[in-house]
Amino acid sequence: MPRVALLVPVIFSPRDSRESWGRFRDIFMAGAKLVTRCPLAAGETIVFDATLSGENVITSVPAKVAWAHREGAYVVCGLVISDGAASRDILKAIKNLLASQREAHLAKIRTGKTLPEFSVA
């Protein structure tokens, strides 16, 4: 399953710290890219909640910060999700998200409100 580019809010708690927030830039079954102002570092463990869209909610997902670097005032982190149940929940949420986006796109095509993104020459 490839990474899905999206920009959604994330609420997370680093170990022994109060709740913080950020945004996912992308997510896939075994990880995500998080942008935050919280000073996270490689090796830290966090627990996060996120709503990918509508009813596609993932909660209490443990993740380890694999890498982190600063981009101006923000910290960009690569997260690794190794919990099997959480990975399955994320995969299900991604599939639901992609299916709903596909249906919305097809509905627009049927009503003539947009052109297909792809064409065969």
Image (tube, helix red, strand yellow):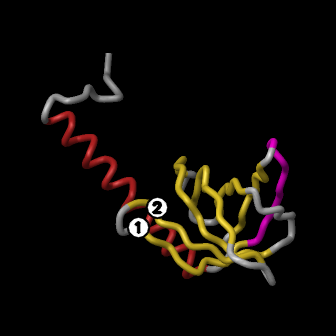
Q: Is the magenta stretch mostly helix, strand or loop?
A: strand
Measured along the vertical axis of the image, is residue 51 above or below residue 27?
below
In the image, what residue occupies the spot 86% across and 64% down? 42
**Residue 81 shown left or right of residue 118 in the figure:** right
In the picture shown, does residue 116 fall above or below 3? above
Residue placed under numbered mark 2 in the picture: 52
> Does the segment drawn in magenta span residue 67?
yes
Residue found farthest to the left: 111
Disc 1, SS: strand
Residue at point 67% right, 55% down? 33
Where, quadrant-wise, is the C terminus in this rendering?
Answer: top left
Amino acid of disc 1: Asn
Q: Does the magenta stretch include residue 85?
A: no
Residue 56, position in %: x, y?
41, 67
Q: In this view, does 29 lie above or below 75?
A: below
Q: Where is residue 40 in the image (x, y as percent from the top left)?
A: 82, 64
User: Type of residue at label 2?
Assistant: Leu
**Which residues lie in the magenta part?**
64-72
Residue 54: x and y, percent? 36, 63
- Asked whether 117 or 108 is in front, the reply is 108
10 Å neighbourhood of mark 1: few (<14), some, or many (≥20)? some
Query: Disc 2 and disc 1: Cα gap in Å?
Result: 5 Å
Question: Residue 6, relative to residue 84: is it above or below?
Answer: above
Give SS at disc 2: strand
- Identified at 49% across, 74% down, the residue is 89
Q: Name the residue under label 1.
A: 56
